[in-house]
Image (cartoon, helix red, strand yellow):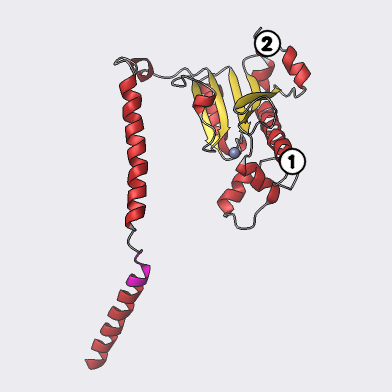
Amino acid sequence: MQKLNFVILITFLFNTSSLMAQSPKPVSKSEINQVREIVRHVIESNDEFVKRLPPDYFNQLIHGQKPMATMVTCADSRLHTHALDIHPDGDLFLVRNIGNQVSTAEGSIEYGVRHLHTPVLFIIGHSSCGAVEAAMSKPAHLEPSIWRELDTIKVTGNNSDDRAQVKESVESNVNHQVSTALKKYATEVKEGHLTLIGGVYDFRNDYSQGSGRLVLINVNGETNPAEIKKMPIVNFK
Ligand SMILES: [Zn+2]
């Protein structure tokens, strides 16, 4: 009996100590405050957004969507819809992932193109893209799930500290994503139902056109800027 009690005591102590070891540390007050401020920012922003709109604003959105374009962008926090569409509600079927990739979001893009029938598929990269830089420098500490998502980023250099190399790799990745989409949607493009447009949102002024400009670098696989300029779809004069 005494032996049994000893076993129970040891088991109890072991379980208690392992439970204590697993218990997370209490969250600090400053962390709670930080999270509260973030949540407050989102709630207040939403409140302001709703208050600025006329009361019947959402009626147009209730019965479905007919977006004008499917757009794939990087998930980077420095690139947002308002830079590319001043009134984006209902306009863009937006797909975001690290490195603005087509293969890792195949189903979402296909829904936009083949079910919502958007006549344009944009693929938009951006200056200083961290995903492109990671694909260049291949840092060892990344998790397997992140590595898998870098698989279809195509870069041209391996020095992510070199601004020119990063710019070139951002372009090469956008062009690669456009060519992946061109293969998949060859019929739609050939029949004129879909136009693929690749661009770079340039907040670092890599293209010397001014910070924050969208630079179009690829239309249906054409990457020569002089040829792109001649195309009626991008000639607005
Ligand atoms: Zn990025």
| Image region (quadrant) for ligand 1 | top right
**Residues packed near mark 1 inside 10 Å, few (<14), some (14 to 19) or many (20 plus):** some
Q: Which residue is mark 2?
A: 235
- Of 7 and 169, the residue lying toward us: 169
Q: Which amino acid is tagged 2?
A: Asn
Q: Residue at x 58, y 49 (%)?
A: 146
The percent position of residue 186, horizontal first and vertical second, equals 68, 23
- Please, which residue is most extreme toward the bottom here? 2
Report which residue position mark 1 lands on: 165
| Residue lying at 61% horizontally and 36% vertically, measured from the top left | 101
Q: Is residue 155 visible?
A: no
Is 189 left or right of 111, judged from the image as shown?
right
Does the rendering let one see residue 66? yes
Q: Which residues are magenta?
A: 20-24
Q: Considering depth in this image, is 58 or 9 the residue closer to the camera?
A: 58
Judging from the image, what secondary structure is the residue with disc 1 in? helix
Q: Is residue 196 magenta?
A: no
Give the residue at the far left of this rendering: 1
| Location of residue 98 by image quarter | top right
**Disc 1 residue type?**
Gln
Residue at coordinates 47% horizontally, 17% vertically from top-left? 66
Q: Earlier in the sequence, mark 1 or mark 2?
A: 1
Q: Counting other residues with Cα less than 10 Å from the Cα at mark 2, is it few (<14), some (14-19), or many (20 or more)?
A: few
Q: Is residue 201 above or below residue 152?
A: above
Could you say where residue 119 lies in the image, as x and y percent from the top left? 58, 17
